[in-house]
């Protein structure tokens, strides 16, 4: 006895209510095993794949590419050979009594022997059987569509666990290959021609988000230079000791996050959002850290309750989020509910910047490059010139609610904490 079971869009986090269908990995009529990935989805900036909880035949897709689907809504129907539907599916069926009935497919008169002859057409060959490496169904599906041979796939360097190739690894490889082909085509005969390329989905999201922020917020920038010598020397003294003990690199980003979290407690007006003329005071301090991806795009993982972490905890959290962001392994909830954002543009040797506010927040702080400069040093015995490490802080804030004095005092306080860093502090 066969049963028709709905595959529903699973919950991907407490704050995620819907997702966009970006691509189907299986076709109607395909046999699906439990845990096979069947569809790609997108929630804001995070891509995911939905696995099947059951084995059977995919008899109907209920959604098209680019459809927006609510969590818990059915996206496909699978015909299984199990005797009774699961309890979960019974509950779904009770809630979905109004759903349009699915017609039972007509009995197929094909002789069983014919299915043996048609095996190559019915059952997709498993690429992993032809290679010593293991590939996910998504990677196999993409490589098949792009005409990438097993030998070519084996040559791609993977960034996943145990060197496995991730979706992003494969897409970056395809993108770079296409760029090389385009460059070759454009320069044939020394004739340079323009190339029109549509933005990726993430590029479109970032573009819309930035434009909306500039349209909505009254951006004002304030800049201040801080002497970061004490903090620089402290990190130089401790970074190797810390790595040997914790097997973690200590960068300036978690230190900056700790300082910003402390100052946000002192300046709660920077830890709010605006809803027309209503001020929403945030109880939690959730700091987003702008992270550059290998494909040139940007994502902002969020450290929830950042003020509750020790510096050691922040180092491990920042390293974990940054690594998983670049590997495309962030969960949807990990890019949600930020209340303030920082961007360490100094990692690109950028002196300073004018960052765009990450809506619906009211402030964002950019940390520039750290450079040695000749500086006037004041002492009880007089002033003299010395070499110091300096950094420029760039603060963008929403002038609809944060005035210049408040925005200036905010970064002045951050400057004070940077310059007053205790060199005897142990982590």
Image: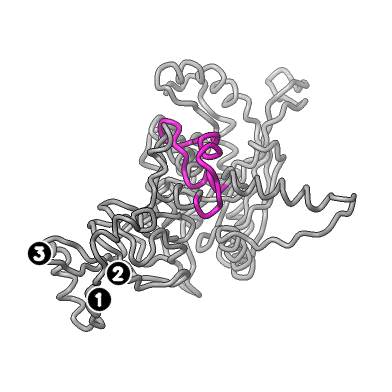
Q: Residues within 10 Å of mark 2 (few under 14, many from 20)?
A: many
Q: Quadrant of the C terminus?
A: top left
Q: CA distance from mark 3 to mark 2?
A: 18 Å
Q: 371 above or below 50?
A: above
Task: Point out residue 368 in the picture as x, y percentages from the top left corner.
Answer: 66, 39
Viewer-proximal residue, 296 or 24?
Answer: 24
Mark number, residue 59: 2
In the current view of this chain or complex, which residue is farthest to the left? Answer: 83
Q: CA distance from mark 1 to mark 3?
A: 19 Å
Q: Which residues are magenta?
A: 144-171
Residue at image location 52% in from the left, 39% down from the top: 153
Q: Quadrant of residue 50?
A: bottom left
- Label 2 residue SS: strand
Magenta-span inclusion, residue 55: no
| Tally of numbered discs | 3
In primary-sequence order, the first of circles 2 and 1 is 2
- Colour setup of the view: one colour
Q: Which residue is denoted by mark 1 in the rendering?
A: 105
Foreground disc of the pair 2, 1 = 1
Task: Point out residue 36 in the picture as x, y percentages from the top left corner.
Answer: 32, 52
Foreground disc of the pair 1, 3 = 1
Mark 2 touches mark 1? (CB < 8 Å): yes
Q: 382 above or below 341?
A: above
Q: Which residue is denoted by mark 3 in the rendering?
A: 84
Task: Point out residue 75 in the picture as x, y percentages from the top left corner.
Answer: 33, 69
Q: CA distance from mark 2 to mark 1?
A: 9 Å
Instruction: Answer whether residue 417 is visible to the viewer in this image.
Output: no
- Label 3 residue SS: loop
């Amino acid at each position: 006895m066969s049963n028709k079971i709905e595959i529903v869009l699973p919950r991907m986090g407490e704050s995620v209510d819907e997702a966009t269908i970006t691509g189907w990995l299986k076709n109607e009529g395909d046999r699906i095993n439990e845990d096979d990935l069947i569809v790609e989805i997108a929630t804001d900036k995070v891509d995911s794949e939905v696995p099947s909880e059951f084995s059977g035949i995919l008899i109907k897709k209920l959604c098209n590419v680019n459809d927006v689907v609510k969590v818990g809504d059915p996206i496909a129907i699978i015909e299984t050979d199990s005797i009774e539907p699961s309890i979960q599916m019974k509950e779904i069926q009770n809630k979905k009594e109004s759903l349009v009935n699915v017609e039972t497919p007509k009995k197929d008169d094909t002789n069983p022997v014919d299915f043996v002859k048609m095996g190559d057409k019915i059952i997709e060959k498993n690429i992993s059987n032809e290679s010593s490496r293991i590939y996910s169904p998504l990677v196999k599906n993409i490589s098949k569509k792009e005409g990438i041979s097993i030998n070519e796939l084996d040559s791609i360097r993977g960034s996943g666990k145990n060197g496995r190739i991730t979706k992003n690894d494969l897409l970056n490889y395809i993108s770079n290959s296409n760029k090389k082909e385009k460059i070759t085509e454009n320069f044939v005969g020394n004739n340079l021609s323009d190339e029109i390329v549509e933005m990726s989905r993430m590029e479109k999201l970032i573009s819309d988000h930035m434009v909306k922020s500039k349209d909505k917020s009254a951006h004002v920038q304030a800049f201040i230079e801080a002497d970061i010598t004490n903090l620089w020397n402290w990190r130089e003294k401790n970074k190797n000791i810390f790595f040997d003990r914790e097997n973690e690199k200590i960068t300036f980003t978690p230190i900056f996050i700790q300082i910003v979290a402390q100052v946000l407690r002192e300046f709660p007006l920077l830890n709010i959002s605006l809803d027309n003329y209503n001020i929403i005071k945030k109880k939690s301090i959730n700091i987003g850290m702008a992270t550059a991806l290998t494909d040139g795009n940007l994502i902002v993982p969020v450290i929830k309750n950042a003020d509750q972490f020790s510096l050691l905890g922040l180092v491990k959290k920042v390293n974990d989020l940054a690594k998983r962001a670049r590997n495309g392994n962030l969960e949807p909830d990990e890019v949600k509910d930020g209340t303030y954002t920082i961007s360490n543009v100094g990692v690109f040797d950028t002196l300073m910047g004018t960052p765009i506010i990450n809506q619906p927040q009211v402030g964002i702080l950019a940390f520039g490059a750290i450079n040695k400069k000749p500086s006037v040093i004041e002492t009880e015995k007089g002033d003299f010139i010395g070499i110091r490490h300096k950094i420029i802080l760039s603060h963008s804030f929403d002038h609809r609610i944060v005035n210049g004095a408040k925005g200036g005092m905010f970064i002045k306080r951050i400057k004070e904490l940077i310059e007053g860093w205790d060199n005897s502090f142990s982590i």
